[in-house]
Image (tube, coloured by chain):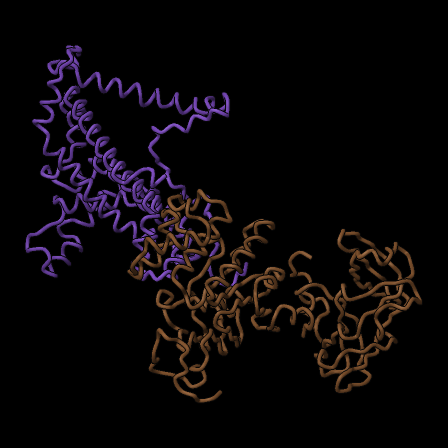
Chain colours: A brown, B purple
Amino acid sequence: MSQVAETPTSPERPSAPARDGDHTAYDGLRLRQVTKEFAGGFTAVRSLDLDVPRGSFFALLGPSGCGKTTTLRMVAGLETPTSGTITLAGQDITYAKPYRRPVNTVFQSYALFPHLDIFENVAFGLRRRKEKDVDRRVREMLELVELSSQARKRPAQLSGGQQQRVALARALINQPEVLLLDEPLGALDLKLRRSMQIEVKRIQMEVGRTFVHVTHDQEEAMTMADTVAVMNGGVIEQMGAPAELYENPRSTFVANFLGQSNLIEGRVVQRAADVTSVDMHGIAVSVPTPRVHTDSDAGWVGIRPEKVLIGPPGEELDAPGNTIPGGVVSDVSFVGVSTQYLVRMPWGQELQVFSQNTGRTRMFSQGEQVELSWRPEYAFLLDRSQDAAAGAAERVGG
Amino acid sequence: MTSTAGVAPPLDVPGTGTGPTPGAPPEVPPETGRRRGKTGYLLLLPGALWLVLFFVVPFYSLVATSLYDPAGSDFRGYEMTWAVGNYVDALQEYWRPMLRSLWYGALATLFCLVLGYVLAYAIAFKAGRWKNLMLVLVVAPFFTSFLVRTLSWKLILADDGWVVNTLQFLQVLGEDGRLLATPVAVVAGLTYNFLPFMVLPLYASLDKIDPRLVEASSDLYAHPAVGFFKVTWPLSLPGVVSGTLLTFIPASGDYINAELLGSPNQRMVGGVIQSLFTDANDYPAAAALSMVLMVLIVVMVLLYVRRAGTEELL
């Protein structure tokens, strides 16, 4: 990190008196070695390191109890870390009181004030800070979330989706450095959730602020966020752009939790700079070396079901490289856009295959002999010591 | 949802007398359920019968008695003479204990509110797993009779008791200062006896408040003190209103505390009514005085409830 002094990162705070070297240059939200232990010895978050760039839409994704909500609450100031530091735009806020930090939260189940009308709910933060122009600003904000006509209603008189937008408006109007969203869409039904995801994303682009979104719904995280951090057991398993996480998972947990994966036992035969050869139940397959995430020879060959092609035995499929013969279709489910097959392999394992209904290939029926294949560049190799089923049970929906 | 956040889910504590309104005013019948047909009315029947027998009939008799000829007696019988003068006489003679009753009742209610709010707040938000035990302790005094408890206060506040001795030693009380037979003792007794009636509705109200609302106020730049007055207090108003009513009404009509802990100078109107009925056998005056007390309380309650803004509370 260069020591160029006075990077003009935060114009509203000209010079923070105590700058601890490493934090100064970063204008986003930074967590370093943050640990939270609750009374009774339960460790919710372990030595967490996290950088959330300013202006990004960041998702913390993980199953119940993975520590994502605790992380969020520590950033909000509602919990105090046992150790570690949290800095925001170069300022240490680890122990700052929640009402003193430029961070606002959209709470799970919204926590709207039931005794105040929508207008006063949204105005709450501005009034506490004795800001000017409350009327105009609240009206503008209500317009942004399309609730102008509901200003004088009580929260209980609104629908779930409307309450959700009030909660968003109430937090956003304070122009926080970071907006925290704690599973804000969890209480909505599927259809409404989809439209709110697009809505929240639109608002984030419009206001250009940093959003940190906590969710256990992998689809929601992937649709909305620029960067997703997958959390499990109090640590971050992997972090990156949604496509990167999905296409190149580094652990079985990520492979299963973020969409589905076929994981097949394999043994590394030869490692080269670009391609690693793997013996998979007697079949030689190759995996691009950058997608090999284990140092040991025992691994799991991973492939996403939609990357697997299915065809009759002996037919040349459009996937030179990895061809696995000897499969028998054991289950077929037609879901319209695709057909999902379960194929029993000679070594007893059932693999999943999603086949797009392009009309170019015929459907296979139960008991038919088939051959599977995939392009080597889609495969990945994970460490065998990891549980092949990790994360599968916690996954939401498909 | 992660359970790691340390936020206790809002538990509904069943039983243990936490029901908000054990002695709720019975005069409000449930909404007439138009959709429900006859069942609703049938369910109302036992309560209505009870009220007719033990409220409407006695009330009618009380009103009638208050208008009997004051010259009547048990020997000569009573005549209905529409003697409105009974009211004038009763007020002229007993306006002091009447006002004193309302004043002591109001003071006791205020002290109950302050003590009870702190207690109920602590039970609702800070007691953790001791919640139920603390609620039982609040109700525990009811296991002994009201009279016994008040009599024991007489011992505690006695002239040679340790409380008076200590206060004398600390120069709070003079050499021959005393507590018994003073307004302090009476108001203290009332406060003590009616505190549970304040605590329980307050607790019921406070316990319903989602702790996340307080967190939200803090997240929205409210200092905890500001958050209390902007969020917790307004949301606890239903409990404050029902608690003050449940305390003020019985406290201002009470006479045991004044009789046992006070002197004739602290006599409350309940005591006057009692002695008119049982000692002087002056039923018309006693009935008239009862009516006046009742009307005063009803008027004050109506003004209060209107002032507190019922539609905000319900």
Q: Give the residue furthest to the right.
A: A314
User: Which residue is more in the foreground, B294 or B188?
Assistant: B294
Residue B288, horizontal then vertical, whole percent: 17, 22
The correct choice, above or below, for A107 with respect to B194 in the image is: below
Would you identify the image quadrant in which residue A217 lies? Answer: bottom right
**In which quadrant will I find the C terminus of chain A?**
bottom right
Q: Visible in this render: residue A233?
A: no
Would you identify the image quadrant in which residue B285 lies? Answer: top left
Residue A286, horizontal then vertical, whole percent: 81, 78
Left or right relative to A226: residue B45: left
Residue A321, horizontal then vertical, whole percent: 84, 75
User: Which residue is more in the foreground, A173 or B195?
Assistant: A173
The correct choice, above or below, for B70 with respect to A61 in the image is: above
Left or right relative to A124: residue A35: right
Q: Give the residue furthest to the bottom.
A: A3
Residue A256, horizontal then vertical, whole percent: 69, 66
Q: Give the residue furthest to the left.
A: B175
Residue pictured at 42% horizontal, 28% vertical? B31
Residue pictured at 38% horizontal, 41% vertical? B20
Q: Visible in this render: residue B256?
A: yes
User: Which residue is more in the foreground, A37 or B159?
Assistant: A37
